[in-house]
Image (cartoon, rainbow, N blue to C red):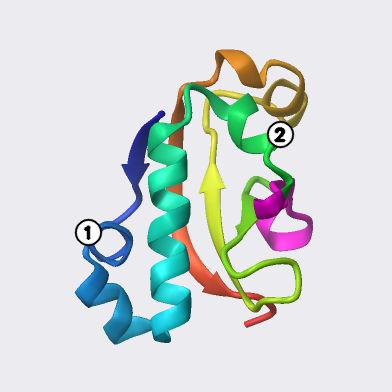
Amino acid sequence: MIIEFKTNKVEKQCTDLKEAKRCFSDKVAKRLHKLINFIDAAENLKSIIDNSAYNFHDLKGKKKELYAMDIDGRKGSYRLLAKFDRFSKEQVFNCSISIETIQIEEVSKHYE
């Protein structure tokens, strides 16, 4: 997949392990980079959705146009937030095989 980052800060956290370790715990930093490598190697969004380990799901409320992937498992606090500007929620889930670009918005701690 093609990965686009919202800001330089987010890009640095996701591509520079040393920077990620400054911002997050060692465990979260390593798992974040593992997730980014997985996304980078994926052919399309369907490959990501089909991998239940990251629990790809849509968000509600103020973040209803964003989608989340768990970085450290279902019980972990950190998640990677992504967006698909040109696609509706229905298209994201029903036409995921044709989506080849992901926009990473932020790495967030759940409920903060």
Could you say which is closer to the camera, residue 9 or residue 39?
39
Q: Which residues are magenta?
A: 53-64
**Disc 1 and disc 2 in contact, CB within 8 angstroms:** no
Tell me where residue 23 appears, x and y as whole percent. Answer: 34, 83
Q: Amino acid at mark 2?
A: Asp
Tell me where residue 65 appears, x and y as whole percent. Answer: 65, 45
How many numbered markers are drawn?
A: 2
Q: CA distance from mark 1 to mark 2?
A: 29 Å
Residue positioned 48% across, 53% down in the render? 35
Tell me where residue 29 appears, x and y as whole percent. Answer: 39, 73
Q: Residues within 10 Å of mark 1 (few under 14, many from 20)?
A: few
Tell me where residue 54 appears, x and y as whole percent. Answer: 65, 53
Using the rendered view, name the quadrant where residue 4 is placed.
top left
* 20 up-or-down from 97: above or below: below
Using the rendered view, name the quadrant where residue 101 is placed.
top left
Left or right: 91 as drawn, with respect to 81 = right
Secondary structure type for disc 1: helix
Disc ID at residue 8: 1
Using the rendered view, name the quadrant where residue 69 is placed.
bottom right
* 28 up-or-down from 37: above or below: below
Q: Give the residue number, with chain letter if any, for mark 2.
A: 50
